[in-house]
Image (spheres, helix red, strand yellow):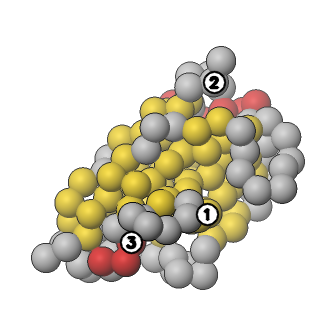
């Protein structure tokens, strides 16, 4: 059973930075893709960033140039570095991972971590 545990959320002022972490229960070498999604109140869950085992990265247009997805294989952890945060980045952020190519999200989810951008 794959477990994904997020951390690093919180309250930050506009223009600030946060780094989210997602630790997997097993080796992330086995994953085909790891990603971060977010869901704001009243909105659908959306892809923020994805990294595949082939080192292909995908970012939502709204976060390009501000967010960076990366991994630390030794720690079985995927990170989301978020800079120049805006109020519209406020959402619950979810870690997502799986072993095979899919259309849409991979099958495994973390429980989410709240990010609030407000002055």
In the rendered image, is residue 72 in sight?
Answer: no
Q: CA distance from mark 2 to mark 1?
A: 20 Å
**Would you call the spot at circle 1 few (<14 residues within 10 Å), some (14-19), or many (20 or more)?**
some
Rendered residue at 50%/49% (across/down): 94
Numbered circle sitting on residue 73: none
Numbered circle sitting on residue 89: 3
* Residue 21 percent across, percent down from the top left: 43, 44
Which residue position is annotated with label 1?
Answer: 47
1 and 3 marks in contact (CB < 8 Å): no
* 60 is higher (above) or lower (below) than 19: below
Q: Is residue 32 left or right of residue 72?
A: right
Residue 76 in which image quadrant: top right
Q: Is residue 18 left or right of residue 52?
A: left
* Residue 1 percent across, percent down from the top left: 65, 18
Q: Is residue 116 left or right of residue 27?
A: left
Rendered residue at 65%/36% (across/down): 108
The mark that comes first in sequence, 2 or 1, is 2
In the rendered image, is residue 89 in sight?
Answer: yes
Secondary structure, mark 3, is helix
The mark that comes first in sequence, 2 or 3, is 2
Q: Is residue 56 left or right of residue 90?
A: right
Which residue position is annotated with label 2?
Answer: 2
């Amino acid at each position: 059973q794959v477990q994904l545990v997020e951390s690093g959320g919180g309250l930050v002022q506009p223009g600030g930075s946060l780094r989210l972490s997602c630790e997997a229960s097993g080796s992330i070498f086995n994953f085909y893709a790891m990603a971060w999604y977010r869901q704001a109140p009243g909105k659908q869950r959306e892809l923020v960033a994805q990294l595949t085992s082939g080192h292909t990265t995908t970012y939502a247009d709204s976060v390009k140039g501000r967010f960076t997805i990366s991994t630390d294989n030794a720690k079985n952890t995927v990170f989301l570095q978020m800079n120049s945060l805006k109020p519209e980045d406020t959402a619950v952020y979810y870690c997502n991972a799986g072993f095979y190519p899919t259309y849409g999200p991979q099958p495994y989810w973390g429980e989410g971590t709240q990010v609030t951008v407000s002055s």
